[in-house]
Amino acid sequence: MSQSKKTKGKLSSFFELLVQSLKGNEVDLTAISIKRAIILLAIPMMLEMAMESVFALVDLYFVGHLENSSNAIQTVGLTESVLTIIYSLAIGLSMAATAVVARRIGEKNPEAASKAGMQTIVIAVSINILISIAGLIYARDILLLMGASIETANHGTDFVRIMMGGSLIIVLLFLINGIFRGAGNAAIAMRSLWIANIANIILCPIFINGLGPIPAFGLTGAAIATTIGRGLGVSYQVYNLFNGKNALKIRLSYFIPDFVQIKAIVKIAAPAIFQFVIASCSWVFLAELVATTGGDEGSAGYQTALRLMMFFMLPAWGLSNAAATLVGQNLGAGHIDRAQQSVFQTLKYIIIFMAIVSVLFLSCGHLFAAFFTTDEKVIAIAGKALKILSVGFVIYGAAMVFSSAFNGAGDTWTPTKINVFAFWLFQIPFAYFLAKCLEMGPTGVFIAIPTAEAGIAAAAFILFKKGKWKKTVV
């Protein structure tokens, strides 16, 4: 009887914690239990990242049922591969924002945290204007450069123009969420993605297939819907920045460029951006290698597998982001041992999550792929890719936690150096050797991915244990 009461008590306590995490009530994360702090951050962060992955899956689902679906799927996939470079800019800046904001919040200085966050937005807007212009002008050339056929490039030019032309919205969505995460309010970041995704799910079939006075835009409609959805999410973020109800109190004067502050942020953001550009360029090269060795079906299968993989990888990344916030805030509060304990506790949770995902993909990968396309060749390739990739899922999760810990501490150079060796000096040459020299085609690319990730996880663990990150000044 007493055991039953204990179980009910634990369930009741967890439910209360779940509700609190979704509401986003402000809590001193440096004072409560580590497990409680991780759950309060991880639940909304995982839901936030799951929503981010839904964007690509929703687009993939609807365009996968259009005529010439192979071309449409390839366009979406190749565009997402290029957009990962923009995501790298967004993620790098958001990491810098999270690290600085978390450190200032840990020091109990919310005014400095607010100003740092706004200066990061100034940097983002300045850089992204140039990227948007380049995307509008060179959309077709970008698809051809990625290995798309002329037919696919002609078919997808408008899609690329809209997605890259609206890239500032993508950057702001990531960046402002990074600011809220650093402040410990992951619930606002989560809700902004909910709003964006609900809008995208509603608008995608309308703009793709047409409704009433709205014509059927086909593939281009997916880009229109996604951009509008993300724009609504950013609007919600901006409202919460200025409503004065959070730890961050924003003033217009914080948007006046402070070059001393900007220099400090860039010092953290530059290697963080480079860190993800390295990874993104590797994914771009791999996508091009699959397209040239596997044709349109091989490319479509690979892109389908990647979208499915990212659907589960992004929530894991959300969980690892909890470690980044806790490391930053605890270092700011002077609790170094607690920062390290937070990382290893997060590692336990992510291993369990990724092990479950591995089992799902190993047993049902081809069924997941069949949901997005009826092309048997595409399904077969996607299923094979998922089986190979899922072998390394637990390793991916471990690598993400340690990388997030470094970034949360403001030590963005360490994971950057690891990525240079793992991706450019090993993964790319190894994938090329398997795919072309050994004539394994796309299968060789699939094998190279988990092999490189194993190296990243091992190197990150060794360097984390050395503890240089504890002395990082932010």
Image (tube, grey):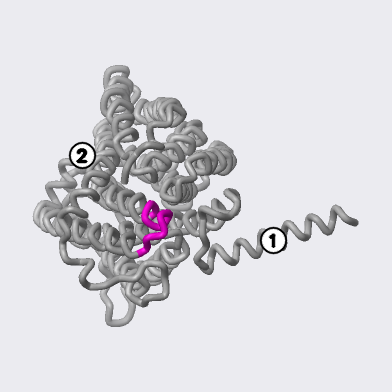
Q: For mark 2, what is the residue?
A: 147
Q: Residue at x 30, y 26 (%)?
A: 421
Mark 1 or mark 2, which is nearer to you? 1
Q: Which of 409/241 is in front?
A: 409
User: Which numbered marker is on residue 387?
Assistant: none
Residue appearing at x 52%, y 39% in the figure: 337
Does any portion of residue 231 appear in the rendered image? Answer: yes
Can you name the residue that lies furthest to the bottom here?
Answer: 213
Which residue shows up at 22% across the image and 73% down it?
Answer: 252
Give the residue type that dot 1 points to: Ser
Is residue 208 placed above or below 353 in the rendered structure? below
Answer left or right for 336 relative to 71.
right
Three-letter residue code for mark 2: Gly
Label 1, secondary structure: give it.
helix
Image coordinates of residue 436 in percent, x first then y, are: 27, 22
Give the quadrant of residue 37.
bottom right
Graded by Cα atoms within 10 Å as few (under 14), some (14 to 19) or many (20 or more), the crowding at tag 2 reads many
| Residue 299 higher or lower than 259, as above or below | above
Looking at this view, is 161 or 395 the one in front? 395
Pick the quarter of the image with the N terminus.
bottom right
Residue at 48% x, 38% y is: 397
Q: Quadrant of residue 190?
A: bottom left
- Region rendered in magenta: 102-110
| Residue 282 among those drawn in magenta | no
Where is mark 1, residue-wise? 13
| Image location of residue 291, percent across then percent down | 27, 37
